[in-house]
Image (spheres, helix red, strand yellow):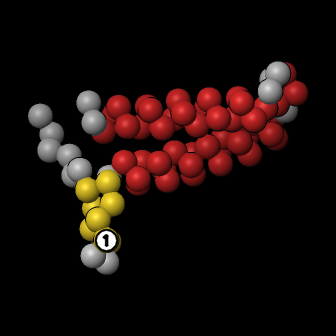
Amino acid sequence: MMDVMREWSISGVIFPAITGLFVLSLMLMWLLDMLFARLGVYRYVWHPALFKLSVFVCLFCFTAFMVYQ
């Protein structure tokens, strides 16, 4: 089993490692949001804000499960 860092120390402040995964998911969501807007995906979605939130949650869970399996 791979040993995963559970917390990071940045300038003496301890952060949970999942915070980095959250930021990574935000950046991926930002890129996907631009792609979806350019392709016109949001025209076919009933509630764009809810769709964005659900895509973000899926990205965040996927990255967390890949690290903390």
Residue situated in front as seen by the camera: 43 or 46? 46
The amino acid beneath tag 1 is Val
- Which image quarter holds the N terminus? top left
* Residue at (48, 38) in percent of width and height: 60
Report the label total.
Answer: 1
Q: Residues within 10 Å of mark 1 (few under 14, many from 20)?
A: few
Write down the residue under mark 1: 13
* Residue at (70, 29) in percent of width and height: 51
Task: State left or right for residue 52 relative to residue 58.
Answer: right
Residue 65, image quadrant: top left
Task: Spot the residue most to the bottom.
Answer: 11
- Which image quarter holds the C terminus? top left
Q: Is residue 34 above or below residue 49?
A: below
* Residue at (36, 48) in percent of width and height: 18
Q: Is residue 14 above or below residue 19?
A: below
Task: State left or right for residue 19 relative to residue 42.
Answer: left
Q: Is residue 26 above or below residue 2?
A: below
- As helix, strand or loop, the secondary structure at mark 1 comes to strand
In percent of width and height, residue 5 lies at: 21, 52
Task: State left or right for residue 54 relative to residue 44.
Answer: left
In percent of width and height, residue 21 lies at: 42, 48
Residue 38, image quadrant: top right
Residue situated in front as seen by the camera: 16 or 67? 16
Residue situated in front as seen by the camera: 27 or 51? 51
Task: State left or right for residue 5 relative to residue 54.
Answer: left
* Residue at (56, 49) in percent of width and height: 26
In percent of width and height, residue 61 lies at: 44, 32
Task: Spot the residue most to the right.
Answer: 43
